[in-house]
């Protein structure tokens, strides 16, 4: 694994901050609304933004409204108890992914699962997607979230000094 430079770490940090304030903060605020229409709209907007909409086929849409096809996602995320601390984030991701997958034709929804859990407020979730893997220099294809997280954590340890210096 490659050690990142301070300028790379600074660039990535500023990019993340920009994206967060430009897009993701609104998704989080809308997702936490008391109105389910706002919450579904937030899920659809974030699914489009994170390029995971195609993961949830329209044939599973329970109604005519396009974002209602994500109602099962909202229901599954709502079953996760926020008052219970999650010490095993890998199990949370894997169990949530299994529940979501069963509602959408048993296909892999791991990338979407990590993004939606992050949106829900589980900020210790390691987002699993091709951009993150590319940015971190991962060349291996992961069959499990656990393997990805282990390598992500190792990469973080190797670069901790520079990351902490920038942040």
Image (spheres, grey):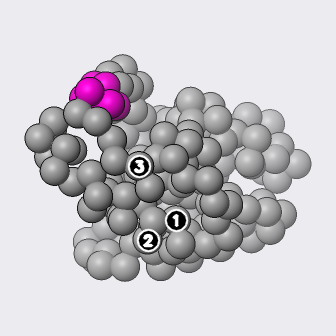
Tell me the quadrant of the picture where the N terminus can be found: bottom left
Q: Residues within 10 Å of mark 3 (few under 14, many from 20)?
A: few
- The residue that appears at 82% across and 53% down in the rendered structure is 60
Task: Mark 2 and mark 1 in contact? Answer it, CB < 8 Å.
Answer: yes
Q: Which residue is mark 2?
A: 150
What numbered label is drawn on residue 30?
A: none
Q: Residues within 10 Å of mark 2 (few under 14, many from 20)?
A: few
Against 2, is 87 above or below?
A: below
Q: Quadrant of residue 27?
A: top left
Gap between marks 3 and 2, in whole Å? Answer: 16 Å
Q: Which residue is mark 1?
A: 148
Magenta-colored stretch includes residue 122 = no
Which of the marked residues, 3 or 2, is nearer the chain's N terminus? 3
Q: Quadrant of residue 35?
A: top left
Q: Which residue is mark 3?
A: 2
Which tag is nearer the camera, tag 3 or tag 1?
Answer: 3
Task: Mark 3 and mark 2 in contact? Answer it, CB < 8 Å.
Answer: no
Question: Element at badge 2?
Answer: helix
Q: Nearer the viewer, residue 33 or 164?
A: 164
- The residue that appears at 31% across and 75% down in the rendered structure is 86
Residue 158 in the image, given as x and y percentages of width and height = 29, 58
| Magenta residues (range) | 7-14
Gap between marks 3 and 1, in whole Å? Answer: 16 Å
Main SS of the magenta part reads helix
Whether residue 109 is visible, yes or no, is yes
- The residue that appears at 27% across and 61% down in the rendered structure is 157
Which of the marked residues, 3 or 1, is nearer the chain's N terminus? 3
């Amino acid at each position: 694994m490659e050690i990142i430079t301070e300028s790379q770490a600074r660039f990535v940090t500023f990019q993340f901050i920009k994206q967060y304030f430009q897009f993701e903060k609104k998704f989080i605020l809308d997702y936490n609304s008391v109105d389910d229409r706002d919450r579904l709209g937030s899920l659809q907007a974030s699914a489009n933004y994170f390029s995971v909409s195609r993961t949830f086929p329209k044939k599973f849409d329970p109604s005519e409204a396009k974002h209602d096809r994500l109602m099962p996602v909202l229901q599954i995320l709502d079953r996760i108890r926020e008052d219970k601390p999650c010490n095993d984030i890998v199990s949370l991701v894997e169990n949530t992914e299994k529940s979501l997958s069963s509602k959408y034709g048993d296909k892999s929804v791991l990338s979407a699962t990590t993004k939606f859990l992050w949106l829900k407020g589980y900020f210790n979730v390691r987002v699993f997607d091709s951009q993150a893997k590319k940015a971190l220099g991962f060349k291996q294809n992961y069959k499990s979230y656990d393997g990805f997280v282990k390598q992500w954590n190792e990469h973080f340890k190797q670069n901790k000094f520079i990351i902490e210096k920038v942040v």
